[in-house]
Image (cartoon, rainbow, N blue to C red):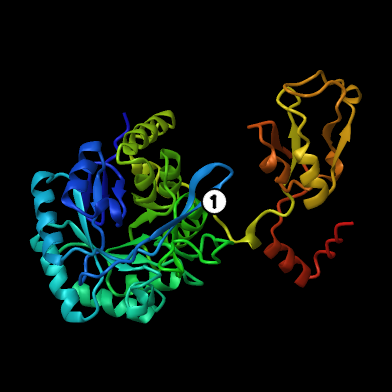
Amino acid sequence: MADLSINFAGIQSPNPFWIGSGPPGNSAHQCHRAFEAGWGGVVWKTIGEAIVNQSSRYSALQLNGQRMVGFNNIELISDRSPEANFKEIREVKDRWPDRVIIASLMVESREQWHEFIKRSEDAGADGIECNFGCPHGMCERGMGSAVGQNPDVIKVIAEWCKEVAEIPVIIKLTPNITDIAQPGRAAAAGGADAISLINTVNSITQVNLDTFCPEPYVDGQSSHGGYCGAAVKPIALNMVERIANDPDINLPVSGIGGINTWRDAAEFIALGSTSVQVCTAVMQKGFRIVADMAEGLSDYMDSKGMKSLEELRGRALPNIQKWENLNLNYARIASIDYEKCIGCNLCHIACEDGAHQCIDLVHPDTLGVDEGPGRLPGKSIPKVRDVDCVGCNLCSVVCPVDDCITMVEIDTGKDRMSWSEYQAAMAAGDMEPIPPHP
């Protein structure tokens, strides 16, 4: 059985699965339940000067019957006193000494950062996470993403924290920025021990077309909020890779954003994460999802012959390149498995209206194809014109049947050539311009 234990910036954890800072980590009661279910760590709901939250606070994107594809909140940091939070951190750490407790903090002055770090250490926290990501409420007060969007300020506060911290300092970054590497480099320059990302994405999920007020509804008004859940996973993966692949950062990464299954977690780890944080999925499904995550990740690693997570971490990073370095002479085309084709013809519609018009509808007899699952007798079925297929993948993406349309590599008979190599050859006069597509 694979070893799921990790060492994150010197913090030992029995597995990589941590509760992300938010409502599921708001009390000792919840943390006890999380650890009983098998979570390796909890990042406590952000502690600062107690605030007053709004009512209501949440909204969601529902899509084709699937609930909470995306989740929006205008909730702020903990509305409980620092005294209550630190007291309960001590209670949890005393009961679960082998599990990880990270104190998420958000305060203003250097003196407050020093004070709250020392209180976190006295409570038994294994590390602190500086919340520089919250995109609503706190940023209007000069905290949260207002800090995360200013690399110079990130560096200064990281330095403040490292002046007194005897436990690892983790900087949590906001995705609401053009280049995530800039704040990442600032955190590293400030002496941070690790980075976590992403926090939530600025959003409005919906508008009520009767009241013309978005949700969440607060006395006839609303506000932009923080977007999370499965819908933000692609954004999170991109930013995790950007941080993990940057040689000027070179810090452990805790990946956050849309993690619902062991596969999600494995993808984050393959792109450089050491730990992964889960919040929205727990709010939707409860703490017990960690059992399936741990079992699934362990089984996957066993199937690949991996003994530890270090063998998985970062495995995908070398395969992420700038577009200019990709092979222009590589080609794949679509191939349809007619034993699986149900004759919906969505691939034809997508290709005809949204892509390259290389899928025709033909009578099954012309292909010598028997009736397939759910296909009406004699109904036309799609056929790819191989010579015109550019390998865009759209047909395979829209097809509702798994593995019915696959992309098959073909030999172009050409040597590998990237755009940058092509430009160099053009400049040297060694190559004619590539003719445009007809």
Which residue is at a point 25% across and 44% down the rendered structure image?
Answer: 40
Element assignment for label 1: helix
Seen from this angle, which residue lies furthest top?
370
Which residue is at a point 28% across and 50% down the rendered structure image?
Answer: 24
Number of on-image labels? 1
Q: In the picture, residue 396 is in which quadrant?
A: top right
* On-image quarter of the C terminus: bottom right
* On-image quarter of the N terminus: top left
Left/right placement of residue 295 relative to residue 205 reads: left
**Residue 169 at least partly seen:** no
Left/right placement of residue 405 relative to residue 97 reads: right
Q: Position of residue 281 (x, y in %)?
A: 39, 46
Q: Is residue 405 above or below residue 177?
A: above
Q: In the picture, residue 43 is in which quadrant?
A: bottom left
- Front residue (pair 70, 362): 70
Q: What residue type is disc 1 on?
A: Asn
Q: Which residue is mark 1?
A: 319
- Front residue (pair 211, 413): 211
- Front residue (pair 417, 117): 117
Q: Position of residue 312 (x, y in %)?
A: 40, 43
Left/right placement of residue 370 relative to residue 96 reads: right
Q: Position of residue 69 (x, y in %)?
A: 50, 48
